[in-house]
Amino acid sequence: MTHRLCVIEGDGIGKEVIPAAVRVVQTVIPDVQTISAEAGWECFQKRGISVPQSTLDTIRDCRTALFGAVQSPAHKVEGYRSAIITMRQSLDLYANIRPIKSLPGLSPRPDIDMIIVRENTEGLYSGREHVDGDTAIAERVITRKASTRIGKSAVDLVKSGNRSRLSIVHKANILPMSDGLFRDSVRSVIDDLKNPEETWSVDEILVDTAAMKIINEPEKLDVLVTTNLFGDILSDEAAFWAGGMGLAPSINLGDEIAVAEPVHGSAPDIAGKGIANPIAAILSAALLVRYCWKCTSEADQIEKAVQQALIAEIPVKDKQIVPGTSTEMITQAVLNHLN
């Protein structure tokens, strides 16, 4: 079987870290065929659209994509729409998976291993905003369909990963209709899919309590499922325990299509200098290998190689990779530890 991968480098350091991740993937899965496409701010400046239809078609054709980074304008630009939100909504990538796992030498604690499962297509990111004079209104859209399928994604992750607990994160005490619908829909999925002999547990956590638990009891959290904005904020907060957002991987999953992406931005201040850290892109590619191509042992190899490289070769000081360490040095260190 040939694995086809749409490669979208995007803006800034995406052009450096994505090729590094592709090298790693092709080392463990030599038959990977890559097809290049474009998206992002530079694409918009050149073509007047952040994600061309040809890019969406290529992703659909390949079914998997690796996206680098996007540089977004700090103010409203007529006609511009976020590239990643466009891909998520156009391709119905409804589940955003953010693993938070301790990395040797970089994480403040060695015992963190949680996954945040975020509904990816609606909530406050539905794009329904309007202004009437001095009042701006953003509509928060919660549907039973989206809540049900993100609940199923979370249950599948718990079962396939032999996890011990699923926590539903919401604010139904203040938003009883919208978050109440989300919570009840996820609960209904769990009732349908959880077999009596299975030992994993289910609980509910208010979002502000979840934020506090991420700070002071992260080792007690396992799999969390929540709505779009809550998931965005909580996963960025939790990234602290895995070395920060610059090292955080993620993947956007639909029923048949997936786009993996490092969480970091385009970092224009270091773009082109050859010092961008490719670890988040490499770990994002590993998620694609694991969840889309079902190549579990190969994904394990990549993640293990990152950990071994951090222990043995990559220079780390004061919980960070020594500034100025080259992209090539980090990439080669990971490649050195692949079986």
Image (cartoon, rainbow, N blue to C red):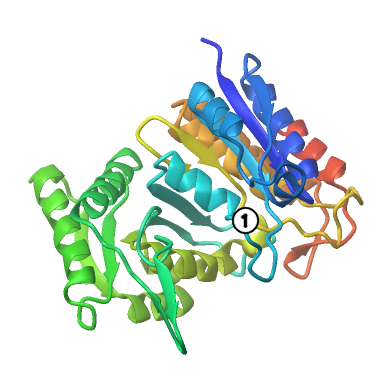
- The three-letter amino acid code for the residue at tag 1 is Tyr
Q: Secondary structure at mark 1?
A: loop
Measuring from the top left, give residue 147's x and y in whole percent: 24, 55
Q: Quadrant of the C terminus?
A: top right
Measuring from the top left, give residue 66's x and y in whole percent: 61, 37
The answer to whether residue 25 is above or below residue 93 is above
Q: Residue at x 39, y 42 (%)?
A: 92
The count of marks equals: 1
Q: Residue at x 47, y 29 (%)?
A: 296
Pointer 1: what residue? 80
Name the residue furthest top. 1
Q: Residue at x 70, y 31 (%)?
A: 22
The answer to whether residue 114 is above or below residue 74 is above
Name the residue furthest bottom. 134
Nearer-the-camera pick, 158 or 8: 8
The answer to whether residue 275 is above or below residue 171 is above
The answer to whether residue 16 is above or below residue 217 is above
